[in-house]
Amino acid sequence: MNPIELRKDFPIFEEKINGHPLVYLDSAATSQKPRQVLDVLKRYYEHENSNVHRGVHTLGTRATESYEQAREKVATFIHAPSANQVVFTRGTTESLNMIAYGYARTRFQAGDEIVLPPSEHHSNLIPWQQVARATGASIKYLPLQPDGTIRLEDVEATVTEKTKLVTIAHVSNVLGTINPVKEIAEIAHRHGAIMVVDGAQSVPHMPIDVVELDCDFLAFSGHKMCGPTGIGVLYGKKELFEQMEPTYFGGEMIDVVELYESTWKEAPWKFEGGTPIIAGAIGLGAAVDYLSAIGLDAVAEHDAKLANLAMERLQAIDGIDVYGPQAGVHRGGLVTFNLRGVHPHDVATVLDTQGVAVRAGHHCAQPLMRILGVGSTARASFYLYNTEDDVEHLVEALQQAKEFFGHAIG
Ligand code: PLP
């Protein structure tokens, strides 16, 4: 894998940002899009645009074939046993909410428990709060180690026969921690609970095999994996999709509609009410082709190598606090840090003047920020188009920021 060659696929790198070449270190928020995906979107609108599953005309057939082929590609990508286990959604947030509304809210009751760590993205935390409010079920949080990792013995101690659902991010969007989802799924299943995996930060960056992980549901977003915005995936086990209720009712998802009651199609179509995100799904199919051609093992190794390098380089700068697993620990491709005494928004603004794009804020993880004892942090995240030079640019820009804010650091 050669990131310098791969960069040429991404037109955005021709942009100059404040007079500098773009150093894009915010792929955990959203990734850039290669020409191979942009071209497929253009081709779809120019040569296939039509609604799916309804028209018998040629364009309708073309669009339907491309849309369903994209589902096959995504299924192969995550090793789902059947394409019918892949539902197209708007993204991770929608996928997780669909499980909460269509599965948990109709099943859980007072006395039931939902287990998760307090480090989750709000998208994998608030839906469960809402389920708890609506059903009387309660939430139990897994203890976090100081570096943000979870100990399996704590999972064993927290999950009981009362637990109905265990959920966790495969890779933390704040700390880069890679959580042992396979082992956690095994504990959940032993107690009769289902396992929901937030794959927003793992599916784009490492090979995923849902059968091997034995998760019951997996949620992820297309825009973080070279695909368009507005498309995501909910994978589910067949029997759970059979039990789960649709969240959206209307066109496309029905079998027979009577005046006072109706029946639904089978999964995945019963979950895709209304005109689906046709171009988005086809674009995601192209993104999957693109990533598969590179190889997810190579992407994982590359991203982790850059994150480790960044970790080492940042830890060596006086005045910078780095959070999460330390250098050398197997991690996802991101590093979270603060320049002591300076608000991360100010750090990110100074970095931006040098063309370096990092994320600053609470990263949709306010409870985790409280545990870390900070209001917010800066985060540099890496993907297949980043290079070691990008890490050096980050370090140089941070040195400049440090000088700029020297008075604040004291
Ligand atoms: N979960 C994690 C771990 C994330 O990093 C994100 C996005 O940053 C989400 C969920 C939500 O993804 P989306 O905004 O695409 O729905």
Image: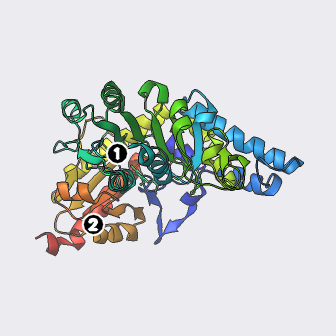
Q: Is residue 38 visible?
A: no
- Circle 1 Cα neighbour tier, 10 Å, few/some/many (<14 / 14–19 / ≥20): some
Residue under numbered circle 1: 109
In-front residue for pair 74/12: 74
Eyeballing the image, is 275 above or below 291? below
Q: Mark 1: which amino acid?
A: Gln
Query: In the figure, is residue 125 to the left or right of 74?
Result: left
The secondary element bearing badge 2 is classed as helix
Q: Which residue lies furthest to the left in this view?
A: 410
The secondary element bearing badge 1 is classed as loop
Q: Which residue lies furthest to the bottom in this view?
A: 407
Checking the image for residue 350, the label placed there is: none
Query: In the figure, is residue 271 to the left or right of 381?
Result: right
Residue occupying the point 24% across, 32% down: 160
Residue 41 at x, y percent in the picture: 70, 53
In-front residue for pair 15/228: 228
Residue 377 at x, y percent in the picture: 27, 61
Query: In the figure, is residue 202 to the left or right of 292?
Result: left
Residue under numbered circle 2: 344
Query: In the figure, is residue 218 to the left or right of 252?
Result: left
In-front residue for pair 269/230: 269
Residue 281 at x, y percent in the picture: 64, 48
Residue occupying the point 33% across, 70% down: 350
In which quadrant will I find the C terminus? bottom left
Residue 201 at x, y percent in the picture: 42, 45
Earlier sequence position, callout 2 versus callout 1: 1
Q: Mark 2: which amino acid?
A: Pro
